[in-house]
C-alpha cells in the first residue's frame, strides 16, 4: 500500500504478508497501517493504492519464485466535499 497523487508518491510503501487461502470469499487483513505523511500534507486528489501480489514460479526448471501483481485498487482518500472518506470498504 502506498499514498499517491497522480504519479507522485507521498509515502513509503507498506507491506502486509497474508498467508490465507486464495479462494476465501471475504479477505480480512485487520491490521493498522501507518504512513510517514501528515494529514495536512496530503493533497485533495490523493489516492491509496492497494496492490495484491501472489508468489508465483518464475521458471519450472529452476523452481525460483517471485511476486506477481494479481489485483490492484486505486482508492480516492477524499470525497467531492474535500472530506476524508471513512467507514467500511465493502465488496461490491
Image (spheres, helix red, strand yellow):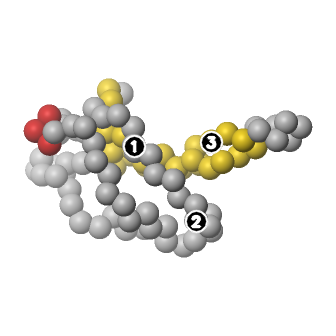
Query: Between marks 1 and 3, how big is the CA–CA gap?
Result: 15 Å
- The extreme right residue here reads 61
Residue closest to the far bottom: 25
- Residue nearest the observer in this picture, 4 or 60: 60
* Left or right: where 65 falls relative to 87: right
Q: Which mark is residue 52?
A: none
Badge 2 or badge 1: first in the primary sequence? 1
Task: Quadrant for the C terminus, please.
Answer: bottom left
Image coordinates for residue 6, horizontal then vertical, percent: 32, 30
Left-right relation of 62 to 31: right
Circle 2 packing at 10 Å, graded few (<14), some (14-19), many (20+), is: few
Please report the residue visible at 67 percent of the width from the left and 39 percent of the height from the top. Answer: 66
4 with respect to 91 (left or right)? left
Q: Which residue in the structure is indicated by mark 3?
A: 67
Q: Secondary structure at mark 3?
A: strand
Q: Quadrant of the N terminus?
A: top left
Where residue 70 appears, as percent x and y from the top left, is: 59, 48
Relative depth, front residue between 17 and 84: 17
Q: Which label sits on residue 14?
A: 1
Residue at 21 percent across and 37 percent down: it is: 37
Residue at x 14% of width, y 42% of height:
39
Q: Quadrant of residue 2?
A: top left
Circles 1 and 3, Cβ within 8 Å, touching? The answer is no
Residue 60 position by quadrant: top right
Determine whether the residue tagged by mark 1 lies in a helix, strand or loop.
loop
Amino acid at each position: 500500500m502506498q499514498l499517491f497523487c497522480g504519479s507522485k508518491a507521498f509515502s513509503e510503501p507498506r507491506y502486509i504478508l497474508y498467508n490465507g487461502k486464495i479462494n476465501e470469499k471475504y479477505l480480512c487483513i485487520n491490521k493498522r497501517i501507518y504512513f510517514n505523511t501528515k494529514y495536512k500534507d496530503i493533497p485533495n486528489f490523493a489516492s491509496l493504492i492497494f496492490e495484491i501480489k501472489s508468489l508465483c514460479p518464475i521458471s519450472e526448471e529452476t523452481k525460483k519464485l517471485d511476486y506477481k501483481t494479481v489485483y490492484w485498487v486505486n482508492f480516492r482518500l477524499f470525497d467531492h466535499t474535500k472530506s476524508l472518506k471513512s467507514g467500511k470498504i465493502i465488496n461490491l
